[in-house]
Image: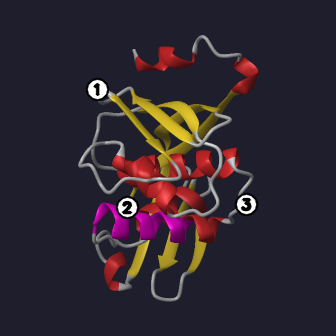
Amino acid sequence: MASNILVEEDEKKVHVAFAPYRICPLGAHVDHQKGMVTGFAIDKGVTLRFVIRKDSRVCVRSGDFSGIEEFDLHSIFPKQGTWGDYARAAASSLENLEHGFDGVIEGSLPIGGLSSSAAVLLCYLMALCFANGIKLDENQMIEKSHIAENVYIGLNNGILDQSCIMLCKKNQLLCLDTKTMEWRNIPMNPSM
């Protein structure tokens, strides 16, 4: 299993980034048209275990895909058409990156759906920010990950996925106006 890449490392140096999957009960696919959407995060998601490097290299393995994705933050390559593009997309959205990481990323459910691509990208973004001392609030994380998916990856998506991942609270439904970016969390009925 790919997770074994970190077993040899000192446990004090291993950091974890987690981004939950999301479910959208109403309004899916209208966020890119500036509509009203709802969504909530679930307890399953994507986990990136990583060790910060002293240099600017990023080396990632996946529990879901074969191979190793590796690149230097000072010369981010164009899109390769591989699962590693999401790490490169995250790096392309940030400036002044000096420290890369070695990591293993894996999802807790089968690949695809539930905003897994947004969760993957946000895990990489969190890791790069942490490794380089970059502080971003939730709105900045949403914006940077959205731009990275649109510009670098080439997806024509809205902000529902990133917003649910960053703004949802446990047992609450996120209501988001994607035109004004006004949002609120509404407690869910306990019987749900």
Q: Nearer the viewer, residue 70 or 31?
A: 70
Tell me the kind of residue under disc 3.
Lys
**Disc 1 designates what residue?**
66
- The tally of labels here is 3
Q: Is residue 142 left or right of residue 32?
A: right
Q: Which residues are magenta?
A: 142-155
- Element assignment for label 1: loop
Does 119 sit above or below residue 173?
Answer: above
Is mark 1 in CB contact (under 8 Å) with mark 3? no
User: Which element type, helix, strand or loop, lies under badge 2?
Assistant: loop
* Rendered image: mark on residue 24: 2
Q: Disc 2 to disc 3, how far (Cα)?
A: 28 Å
Who comes first in sequence, dot 2 or dot 3?
2
Which amino acid type corresponds to the residue marked 1 in the rendered image? Ser
On screen, residue 135 above or below 10? below
Residue 182 included in the magenta stretch of the image: no
Give the residue drawn at x 29%, y 49%. 113
Question: How much space separates mark 1 and mark 3, taking CA atoms?
Answer: 32 Å
Q: Which residue is mark 3?
A: 135
